[in-house]
Structure formats: structure tokens, C-alpha cells
């Protein structure tokens, strides 16, 4: 049972509810929406990502023999439950906001319309996929915004939370505008450009640092980037310079150096001077080591001559905001809008659409959330992407998504581009028709709710 | 290419270094150690976890045809590189601190001794596995310590960072003392007990809350736990009470109720009173909803009559400390100790052992880190677990690891059991012989290092 595809990668209550739905014949159409209840600290917008993985999951959903055997032998379910599961496929419709689009609290970014058991079962894994990639894309967008024109590379695999996180972080950050990743599998899997040089262990394994550099250059003549902070950064830079004539004679161009520790701004200045004095003006300086968007902004503000940044742990764990208050809620069942009213967690009922409005200069102005039936001016964000369990069109290429995200980030107004939470949050209006529906549903049970 | 097992789930520089090692014939024995440089905020100890997954990875390491084809066609490597990779297996030795053991900064918890290319290649995925499970086990231990005797259940799958994180979080938290998980796949995969009830959507899908409860009870007569906060918690508790006689007649016992929002302490008191007044004194109250160890401690300190807690997002993302400063560093190559001296990131060289010392009352007193050859009194923590690429013994059962962790947590001194960082950190001594070796290596290059 592969956790990446097994339908048993779900919460037990999905299965217990499913059994009850089957037993009670509750197979009417359910409408669930995925949205975020509030922004985490230090975020002025979120960037949608993870849709393609969610659609893959829905298309491939099925219980295999191994899973059915476990269900039967677990002793947790009725005898006929396995038979219901055997034939289960996802045959529903999906509407979604395109990946790489900024979105805000209370805006559905994914809507699933399917018979109740199907729509319910997929909850845990859909959230798991869309939540994580959205977390990373939203984090990545921040370093993209503070370092325009710089090379940004995902270095996070080792401290990502497991294999899938490592792989999907490469995808999500690439969509958001990173140049590539160090995670090799992201190339065969998604076609993402790879970056990488050498580790300290390579230098340490050689008795002599200069010998390590010379060895490496011979093996990778086309992309020679030296890691120069293993012992003494400036001394190593001078070793690179001393090595340069001999490499040039062999036809090997020094692409650049990487700094991974210490005062990066000071080292970068010193190293730039050393390289330039030796005529290595085209060799680039790449920095890494506990970096995040704050540190990158600081380094650039200090005028550090750094051409690119490797950003790892802070990106793939979204360390300052490692999760979103993201949920997938029932908004309609059997044609009737539904509303959860739990304290502090109430939802806006019904099938919804988000209309985006732009300023005259093209920047984002505000959004309106309303019922799907309430067609409004503005740009509707949710688009049909799956019908009857089949994708409506082939997955867009990653480069198309990346280009889309780039255009979208370019039209964010200045106050949303700041790293700190803006005192002026983006305006998301709840349309009167939606407020009225919520009030009507509350009245039916004589209980107001607070969103 | 399955990211869970593919050797291409690695950093590009591992492959570029490997090519250089092959090209230069650098296949001598390398010794790498995995350790944590410093404790994250709010942690007084870490709990080792993830070893079995790391050993599985090493045992199964091989490049398949698909991977080799990609390597050849990528244009990144020399023609003969694929042939080197085709035959590559992990044939090394591994020493490790048993899972469920507390450990501290600068203490190696895993040591890999293998020919350089093998030991280097596995770095990214080894860290990825051991880091994440250790992050979660260390976080889980905190709620175990503040809620002795309470039922603790992992509810985190949906906001875990991908599929593997969701699955491994269930394992790591179970080792640390959780009672089980909601993640179904953890049962067939690891034999972890499952917990789960119903979601709000189940209640919402019914026109009437009481009807939802009655339907659910009929389908799950043996484990009926009602979620009672969808609309009005106390009103729902009274519906449960009203339903009780009819369920009892049908031979259905009400196991308990779950609260998921609002003022949990107040609701728990009210609901306890309502249940008790109706004679449902054995029905338990289970709480969930944005919980973490701080909130659990608060609720218990307030005397809230809560029998169990579902802890999700904060656990699986370790939200207050989503990563560790965990590294895997070359300590010896070809028989010679090595030392990285990068500013603020210097390492203690050589093959090391950790000796643990206990107080007379059995509690942890202090540890000594020294060279393997420097046999000392105290309990050595690192044990051989793999030789020549083969496990020395079958994986211990999870329940054995859980029992070990329980004994280990029981002997933590009080100041390490606090949720806040202790002003008196655990004492980890660096043995004189190790300090002398480091000084000697520094002297050879005339450059002191700061750890």
C-alpha cells in the first residue's frame, strides 16, 4: 500500500462516515469547498498550489485488493462495506482557482461536487495535498518578491517533512518563481531545473582544499561552483583565484563560488573583491545557510554582492507559518445549502464563486464572494477543471503556471507585498445574497453564527 | 520513480560529488555522523525516532532502470556514471541510539561507516527521515508529559506536509506515548491503534442533529462517539441524553462525545454535568480543535473534565519548532579524523560514542561525548544496528519502542520536563581526548574553530 496513492491514507472517520452513508443510503450530491479561514502571521496573501496533485489523486482513487483485505480483516466495519468500497471511483465535478493565483480568507479555491461518500472520503488527502503546496508557494512568493532578478534555489529536501514534502516543495516554489531546486527527482518528475555544487564533506575528504577544487573542476568543467567556507572563506577564494589560470588553460570556466556560513555580507564583499582583482568578474557569488526572505532582504539592503540564494529549511517547512487554517467544508447536500455554526468556525453556505476586481492601473483591488447563481461583474476565479471524474483538459505545464504566478505577483498592490502583516488587509466582500442565505439558515435553527 | 524509495530523491550535489569520487577513485571508508547542533526554542531534550525507516532505505538502496535512463539522458553526467550507479548498494555499517531515547545537542544519534560514495549519497534522505520523525516524537513527548493518563490521539494527517509526513507522524507520536492515530494507513502499515468518530459534515448532511446521532449509533454500535459542537454543544449533549434510553434498549452503549470548538473547559464542565445527570457517567469527553501541549496543560490545570485529546496540526508540523538544526557530517575519511570549521558550524571530529550517566535515584544526570576508542564508564548510547549493509537484528516492534520511550521519559529530571526552555540545560561534556583531537586538527591548519 503506497501512502502516496492508497485511499487508506485518510482519517478513520471518513471510513466510519462512509459506512453510515452507505447503510443509510445517503448518496445524494454533496458540495464541499476548500478554503482558508484566516491568514497566518506574516502573510498578506496566499498563493494557490497543489491542484494538479489533487486531481491526480481523484482520478486514481480506488481500493486495491490489499486495501480491501485489510478493511475486511480489520474488524472495524460491516461485512458488506468492502463491496461498497471495491466499486468506488471519483465521478464528481471539481472547480478550482488556477495554481499560482493569490487568494484570501473565506475564498473557496477548490469545490468538489460529488455523491456524498466520494466527496467525503477524499477530504483528508485533498487537504493534505493542497494545503502543503499552498503553504510552500505562499512562503516562496515572499523571497521572490524581495529578491527580484536574483537566482533563488530550493535547497530544502533534507529538512522537509518526508519524501513527498521534499518533492512537492520543489514544485510549489518553482511555480512561485524560484529558478529551480537541488532535489534531483524534481527534474524527471516535473521538469524543474536542477542546481547543485559540492558539500563540505567533499572538501574535507581531500587533504587539501585547493586539490578538492581542482578535482571537482575536472569532473564538472561546464558548471564549476566552489564551496569556499569549509575552513576560511577568503583564503579559499584566493585558492580559487590561484587555480584559475590553470583551469582556463584546460578550458574550464569558473562559474562561481558558494558561501554557506559566517557574515555573508562581509564575506561576499571580500570575495567579490578577490575575484574581481583577478579578473574573474563573471564568476558569481551564491549564498546559502539558514536563509529566509528576511535575511535575503537584509543582505540585499546591505548591498551584498550576492547573485543567488539557496533557501532550504525555512522554505520547505514554511518555518514562520508551517500551516494554514485550511478546511474542506460541506456547503450543500441534496440541493440544500448547509452551514456549520461551531463557535469561531462558522462557514458561508452554498456553492460559491469569487469575483476579482482590478484597479485602473491593473493592480488587485478587491474580491467579492457570492453564490454561484449570483452572477456578478468582475473576473470569476473558480473554473471547472474536472467533470464526471475526468479532467477537462490536460494539466498545464509548470512553466505556464510559473508565468501565470509571475503575472499575478506583479499586480499585487504594494501593501500586500510587504513581509509583515499589512494593517490594511485585502478587501474580501461577502455579497448580500450570501449573507442573507446564511442568516436564513441560522434563523431556521434560531441561532446566529459568528464567522 | 517512487519518491519514497527512489535514490533520485536526493540533492544534486550528492550525484555531482559521487561522480567526482568515482573519477578520482576516492572510495575509502568515510564516517558520517547525524547530530543536532542546538535545541530549537521550547525544547529541553529531543526524542530519537526514524531509525527503522532509515535502515529500510539503506537496505533497499538501488538505482532502477528508469533512474539510470534519466541519469544517462539528463546530460548532467559523464557517460560511465550510470554504470557506477547500477552496481551501487549500501554495504556499510550503522550505529545508532535506539528510537525513543532522549538525546541532546552535539550527540551523534546515527553513525554511518561506508565507502565514501555510499555514505555521501544517502545523506539527504537519511536526514529527511530521521529529522522528521525526531521532530514529531520530540513534540509528541511534550503533550505526553503534561497529560499523564489521558488518551492522546494524532489527528494531523490533513495538515501534515504530504503523505509520508502524515504516516510517519502517526508512528513517531505513537513511539512517544500517544495512544493512537486517526490515520488509517498507520494500522496496516505499523499496527498502530486507530481512533475516529464523525465529522461535522455528517451532522450537517442530516436535516436533524439527533437523527445523525441515531443513524451513526446504529452503524457503529460498539464505538459510538458523537461530535456535539456542530450547532450548539449543550443542546447536542441533551439530544445525546434523550437518545440514550432508546440506544440502551437496542444494546448500544454511548462511548462518549467529542468537543471541537468554543471554550472547551466550560463546554466540558457543562456536558459532563448533563451526561452525569442522565446517568451516563461512563461516557467520556474527548476534545479537539487547534490543541497543543500548552492548551492541554491549561485545560487540565483548569480542571476540565476531559478524558482525551485529539492533537493534529501542532503535532505533525511541530508548529512551534518545525525543524531541527540537524546535520550529517563527515568526521573521518580514510582513517583520518576530519573537522569542518565553518564559522558557527564547526564539528567535533572522529568516530564518537555517548556515555550516559544516571543519578542515584535513576534520573538522567549528564552525558559525555568522546571518541569511540576512549572507552568510559557510563551507558554507551550508540549501538551497532547494521553491518555490511544488513540489519543485525529484526526491527523491534513499535510497542517495544513505545515501552522504551515511556521508561526513558520517566527518568527525565523535572527541569527537562518543563514546556519552556530550562535555564539549566542538560549537561553534555566533551571529553578531553575529543577536545585535544579537535585542537590538534585545528593546529595542523593553524585556525581555531568555534563550535
Image (cartoon, coloured by chain):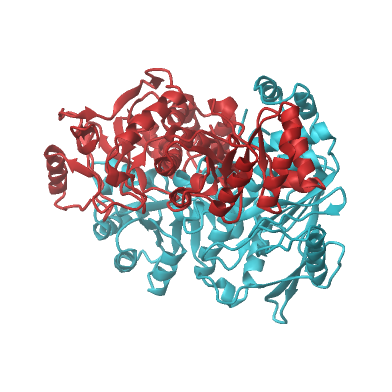
Chain colours: A red, B cyan
Query: Is residue A26 among what the camera can see?
Result: no
Q: Position of residue A412 (x, y in %)?
A: 29, 38
Residue B445 against residue A51 in the figure, above or below: below
Lateral position of residue B332 relative to residue A346, left or right: right
Residue A255 occupies which quadrant of the picture?
top right
Lateral position of residue A174 relative to residue A46, left or right: right
Lateral position of residue B48 relative to residue B348, left or right: left
Q: Position of residue A380 (x, y in %)?
A: 23, 28
| Along the line of sight, the residue nearer the viewer: B292 or A318 | A318
Residue A168 against residue A229 in the figure, above or below: above
Residue B293 against residue B384 in the figure, above or below: below
Q: Position of residue B372 (x, y in %)?
A: 84, 61
| Along the line of sight, the residue nearer the viewer: A302 or A365 | A302
| Along the line of sight, the residue nearer the viewer: A352 or B328 | B328
For the N terminus of chain A, the quadrant is top right
Q: Position of residue A185 (x, y in %)?
A: 60, 31
Residue B57 occupies which quadrant of the picture?
top right
Q: Residue furthest top?
A: A393
Q: Residue furthest bottom?
A: B360
| Along the line of sight, the residue nearer the viewer: A243 or A116 | A243
Lateral position of residue A39 relative to residue A360, left or right: right
> What residue is at 67 percent from the left and 27 percent from the top?
A222
Query: Is residue A236 among what the camera can see?
Result: yes
Amino acid at each position: 500500500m503506497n501512502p502516496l496513492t492508497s485511499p487508506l491514507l485518510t482519517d478513520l472517520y471518513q471510513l466510519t462516515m462512509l459506512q453510515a452513508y452507505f447503510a443509510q443510503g445517503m448518496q445524494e450530491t454533496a458540495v464541499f469547498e476548500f478554503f482558508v479561514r484566516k491568514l497566518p502571521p506574516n502573510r498578506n496573501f496566499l498563493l494557490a498550489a497543489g491542484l494538479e496533485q489533487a486531481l491526480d489523486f481523484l482520478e486514481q482513487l480506488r481500493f486495491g485488493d490489499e486495501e480491501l483485505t485489510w478493511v475486511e480483516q480489520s474488524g472495524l466495519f460491516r461485512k458488506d462495506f468492502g463491496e461498497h468500497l471495491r466499486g468506488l471511483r471519483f465521478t464528481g465535478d471539481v472547480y478550482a482557482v488556477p495554481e499560482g493565483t493569490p487568494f484570501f480568507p473565506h475564498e473557496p479555491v477548490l469545490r468538489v461536487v460529488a455523491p456524498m461518500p466520494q466527496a467525503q472520503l477524499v477530504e483528508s488527502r485533498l487537504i493534505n495535498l493542497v494545503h502543503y503546496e499552498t503553504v510552500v508557494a505562499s512562503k516562496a512568493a515572499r523571497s521572490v518578491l524581495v529578491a527580484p532578478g536574483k537566482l533563488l534555489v530550493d535547497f530544502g529536501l533534507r529538512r522537509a517533512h518526508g519524501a513527498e514534502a521534499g518533492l512537492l516543495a520543489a514544485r510549489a516554489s518553482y511555480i512561485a518563481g524560484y529558478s529551480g531546486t537541488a532535489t534531483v527527482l524534481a527534474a524527471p518528475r516535473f521538469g524543474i531545473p536542477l542546481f547543485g555544487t559540492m558539500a563540505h564533506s567533499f572538501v574535507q575528504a581531500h587533504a587539501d582544499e585547493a586539490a578538492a577544487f581542482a578535482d571537482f573542476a575536472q569532473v564538472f568543467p561546464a558548471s564549476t561552483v566552489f564551496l569556499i567556507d569549509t575552513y576560511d572563506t577568503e583564503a579559499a577564494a584566493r585558492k580559487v583565484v590561484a587555480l584559475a589560470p590553470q583551469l582556463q588553460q584546460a578550458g574550464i570556466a569558473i562559474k562561481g563560488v558558494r558561501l554557506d556560513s559566517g557574515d555573508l555580507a562581509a564575506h561576499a564583499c571580500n570575495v567579490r573583491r578577490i575575484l574581481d582583482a583577478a579578473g574573474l568578474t563573471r564568476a558569481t557569488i551564491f549564498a546559502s545557510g539558514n536563509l529566509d526572505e528576511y535575511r535575503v532582504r537584509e543582505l540585499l539592503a546591505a548591498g551584498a554582492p550576492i547573485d543567488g540564494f539557496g533557501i532550504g529549511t525555512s522554505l520547505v517547512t514554511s518555518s514562520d507559518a508551517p500551516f494554514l487554517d485550511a478546511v474542506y467544508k460541506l456547503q450543500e447536500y441534496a440541493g440544500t445549502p448547509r452551514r456549520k455554526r461551531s463557535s469561531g468556525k462558522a462557514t458561508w453556505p452554498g456553492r460559491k464563486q469569487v469575483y476579482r476586481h482590478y484597479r485602473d492601473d491593473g493592480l488587485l483591488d478587491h474580491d467579492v464572494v457570492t453564490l454561484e447563481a449570483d452572477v456578478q461583474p468582475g473576473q470569476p476565479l473558480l473554473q471547472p477543471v474536472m467533470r464526471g471524474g475526468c479532467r477537462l483538459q490536460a494539466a498545464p505545464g509548470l512553466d505556464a503556471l510559473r508565468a501565470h504566478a509571475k503575472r499575478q505577483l506583479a499586480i499585487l498592490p504594494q501593501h500586500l507585498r510587504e513581509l509583515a502583516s499589512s494593517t490594511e488587509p485585502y478587501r474580501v466582500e461577502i455579497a448580500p445574497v450570501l449573507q442573507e442565505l446564511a442568516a436564513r439558515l441560522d434563523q431556521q435553527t434560531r441561532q446566529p453564527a459568528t464567522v
